[in-house]
Image: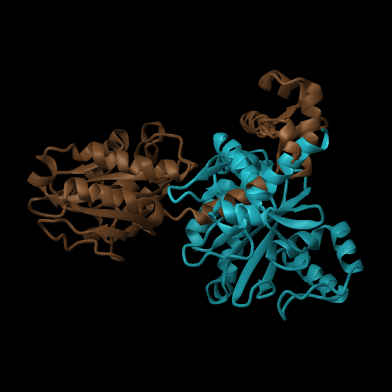
Amino acid sequence: MAAKPIKVMANSADLLNALADNGPMSVVDIAEAISMPRPSVYRLLDALEHVELIGIREDGRAQLGTQILHLASASLQGIPEVSAARPAMARLNELTGQTVYLCAVRNQLVTCLDWVKGTKVTLLLLNPGGTLPPHAGATSRAIMAWDDQLRHSVTASAPLQAITPNTLTTAEQVEADAKIIRERGFSVSDQDVTVGVAALGVPLFDSHGVLRGALSVAGLRDDVLPRQDEFIALLQEAAKETAAKL
Amino acid sequence: MTEATDPSGGMNLVTKSAAVLRAIAEAGELTVSELAERTAEPASSLYRLLSTLQAIGWVEDGSRRGKTRLGLDFVRLGAKLEAQLDLRDLARPELERLHAATGQTSFLCIRRGLRAVCIDRIDGLDVQIHNLRLGESMPLGQGAAPRAILAFEIPEVVQCYLRDLPEDELFGPVAHNAEELRRLLAETASAGVAVAHSDWGQGIGGVGAPIFNHTGAVVGALSISGQTHRVFHSDYDPVAMVQSAAATVSRALGAIQLPEAHLPAVESGAV
């Protein structure tokens, strides 16, 4: 008896994850995706629809419910960095037109806490709640430059995974990169996560000088790199404004 | 088929979990005893439930010992859902309904910079509106749908609009200067709808209503336009129809607040 309720919730989580990955799904598809008999799928959909975690569309397919959006907002509100950075991020986006990211370390991975999408392109590789390895991307490398513990555990596991030909893979590369970033105060990610995409990152310290995460501006390479000086100045201003609230 | 022993198949656990999530969402983070108070569930069963929810990523440890907050997993799920919710798909049935009921040209617009772009439209039955064809845009201060968007935008957008656009683009036939435009935006914001008896020149009028998302931000507008006497002197109420269509789309995007609850951009945006 003790194991079954847990199974119901595990099935619910599997169902929500399947809907997140696939978009709207029919009962038949769901039954197959989460290995559940169809009558049970109906019961689960009923229960989840009742609490608005899923919605049933006019065509009968299930999709994630709008309650998810409110839980996502509430989850973000519980993270101090997010509310502190939000106005600065909105302004960065308005001024640069590029995608603005706020990331922090969770379980040894750099996790995207929040973003403001660029006006020109939507970057698909890193979305809120998604993660990057610490050695790739502007926020990751800005964090790792100042987080010695994280950097040591990363370099200890080298060679690192090459996401593109530009990704740092050796311990020497990571250490040299961290040194340059600490010297000039910002990171430059040139196609080390996605070919054609570049980003600039700055670390986010709180008013006690504790590293809390990083901010970045990301977009198509030709939109970002030629405006490096301008974007870095804006990023540093945003980081300063955010830090004052932490 | 172990579920046969329990007619609900454990589904009441889904309901309990949702109540727990809602309580935590409202409070930010809670201890088990605080949660017990708010959900009327015994602490002993909450301990079990929370450990299950933690295992599936729906909750996590809070900032202090003994506190629980929502899991970052919802941020991931929410971002995926937002990407799946397509404004044009969701608005299309409402656009068709508006067109069928009024016979007027019906528009769906979104903001791009300081202009409103038409991303869907259905032509009217008796006149053809040459403005704002599919993919075309207008300055945010002109026309019913663009103004419905601008009136609910953050103050910075209004300020940028008045600062960055050349004088001859800024204003339409209805507002001739910044002061008039601000007044018009304030009216639009407090009414929750943009009504123009003659906006695009002689005899053409329209009604535009904003569409909001789950955060209360304006993401677009639905509107109808046509000969003023047709739009405003028919057997239907054009304002109520456009507002209700826009509200339906807002609900599908997860909006809970109605436009009235929204802070008008212009009041706080006075330079």
Which residue is painted at 58% across and 47% down in the image?
A: A86
Q: Nearer the viewer, residue B80 or A155?
A: B80
Q: Chain letter for brown, please.
A: B
Query: Which quadrant holds residue B10?
Result: top right
Q: Residue furthest right?
A: A156
In the visual, does A109 lie left or right of A74?
Answer: right
One can see residue A233 in this view? yes
One can see residue A71 in this view? no
- Counting labels gives 0
Q: Chain letter for cyan, please.
A: A
In the visual, does B152 lie left or right of A233?
Answer: left
Q: Nearer the viewer, residue B108 or B40?
A: B40
Q: Quadrant of the C terminus of chain A?
A: top right
Which residue is painted at 62% across and 50% down in the image?
A: B77
Q: Is residue B262 above or below residue B116?
A: above
Q: Nearer the viewer, residue A92 or B72?
A: B72
The spot of residue B200 in percent (x, y) is 15, 54
Q: Is residue B200 above or below residue A138?
A: above
The spot of residue B56 in percent (x, y) is 75, 44
Q: Is residue B177 above or below residue A100?
A: above
The spot of residue A90 in percent (x, y) is 52, 52
The spot of residue B118 in percent (x, y) is 30, 60
Q: Quadrant of the N terminus of chain A?
A: top right
In the visual, does A203 lie left or right of B116?
Answer: right
Q: How is the image coloured?
A: by chain
